[in-house]
Image (tube, rainbow, N blue to C red):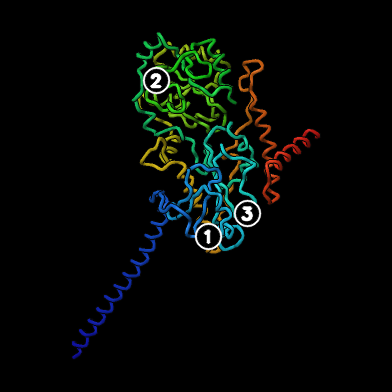
Amino acid sequence: MIDKLWRSCCKKRGFRYKVALIIVGIVVLFYLLIIILNVIESNLDEDRPFFTIHQGEPKDEKLPILIWWTPFTGDSGSYKQCGQYICYFTDQRKYMSDPRTKQACCSNIFPFLLAFLFYGSDFKPTDLPLPRSLTHDWGLLHEESPKNNFLFSMERVMKLFNHTATFRRESDLPLTFQYLESLDSLTSQKYFVPTSVKNEKGKTLAPLVYLHSDCNTPSERDSYVEELAKYIPVDSYGKCLQNKELPSHLSDPLTNMISPELFQLLAQYKFNLAFENAVCQDYITEKLWRPLTIGSVPIYYGSPKIEDWLPNPKSAILVKNFESPKQLAEHLLALQADDTAYEDHLEHIIKGQISNKKLIDAMIDREWGINNDPAKKSFIDCFECLVCKRVAENYKRELRQATPLKFQATFEQYGCPKPGSNFSLKENSPNWWPELYDKAVFEARAMENLIRRGTNYTSTDFYQEVINLLENSAVR
């Protein structure tokens, strides 16, 4: 009897033990599922592509509306998936007065549903989405030369923006390598001409080649090259200082910027003069990357800290390291006669080695591509995605009654120095760029003053404010 009771009790205990194990297992699996879902959600931004999911009029008033105030993408209206978020993108200004955006600007229910995007070269101080609500985010995409719009070299203007995509490394979305296709392109020998062949070509070609068609720039590059050519031969194919003709099918510099035939022509030269049209931190164009990828040594003038991004320490010869064009010419003539010393500057191609970890890491981290790379998004997509995520995240935080994240641009995210007489090699050099910069100083102040008034303003209002500031400055 006792033995039967004991066995019965053991069976019940065993059953209860199994049930308890099952319950514990279910609880553990439940918590594991929550953890996995959180990890997946946190990684959606990286793993999920940016793509259009609907075109047409906006239907969901709780999703952010992002308006390209300066039409840039040609998108009249579409919903786009960006990681875990969805936003409506459009270049139609009518949505500024749409009931959805009125609600966004004037209530506490949906205070983060509207953002305005600007393309820098088309930004005008007389054409802004005003009055500006505290809930209106502004985003700036400007990868072009500072000479296109000096307003962004003013701190008071940059502080008007919340999100940025510029060439500066400090930008929210840095576009520093907008002209560099890949690290592999720097080590490829596709266009490389061996030094022995260059020496043979040098019997009919100059040691240096200059290809520029944008003349009289803020950097005064033509003045420098004109002086340099007094001490060393220079073949100039562009409209500036031209002494050689390009083949007719390569004469348009814009359409042939990445032409293989142009690359083959320039690769025959030992040195390529790579002068930017303006001097600003991280403003680096094809002027540098093109000679590096074709195996010609760039003679570089432009970004003050270009050493941060060169493949190897000797990958470029920097104009700033020479006291005069004459001294630079003497150095180049010495390299012209010394193949070993010359090839020290081509280690990235001859040996296929890049030693600059900062450059390697930056290119690995870059999520966008160029030249219509099908494997990557464009930097325009990435900029739209950046703003979408930030605006939508703040909307989520508002719904949870959490403090919104604050985003504000700084001077360092674009700001460039005033153009000066960089070389002063010619008397009465036609450099009007400093005057344009000074004009932008007063325009920036006028714009800031008028925006603070909280109403829209006309072109007449703006230019009258500029005149008032100029007159007050003259009196002082």
Amino acid type for the residue under numbered disc 3: Ser
Q: Position of residue 306 (x, y in %)?
A: 51, 29
> Could you tell me residue 122's position as x and y percent?
57, 38
Image quarter in which the N terminus is found: bottom left
SS of the residue under disc 3: loop
- C-alpha separation, residue under disc 2 versus residue under disc 1: 55 Å
Q: Is residue 268 left or right of residue 330?
A: left
Q: Quadrant of residue 403?
A: bottom right
Q: Residues within 10 Å of mark 3 (few under 14, many from 20)?
A: some
Where residue 133 sits, quadrant-wise, is bottom right
- Which residue position holds label 2? 267
Taking the spot 54% from the left edge, 24% from the top edge, the residue there is 214
Q: Nearer the viewer, residue 39 or 63?
A: 63
**Mark 3 or 2, closer to the camera:** 3
> Considering depth in this image, is 427 or 197 the residue closer to the camera?
427
* Mark closer to the chain start, 2 or 1: 2
- Disc 1/disc 3 C-alpha distance (Å): 19 Å
Residue at the spot of label 1? 397
Quarter of the C terminus within the rendering: top right
Q: Earlier in the sequence, mark 3 or mark 2?
A: 3
Q: Which residue is mark 3?
A: 133
Q: Amino acid at mark 1?
A: Arg
- Tell me where residue 299 appears, x and y as whole percent: 49, 21
Answer few, some or many: residues within 10 Å of disc 2's Cα (few below 14, many 20 plus, some between 14 and 19): many
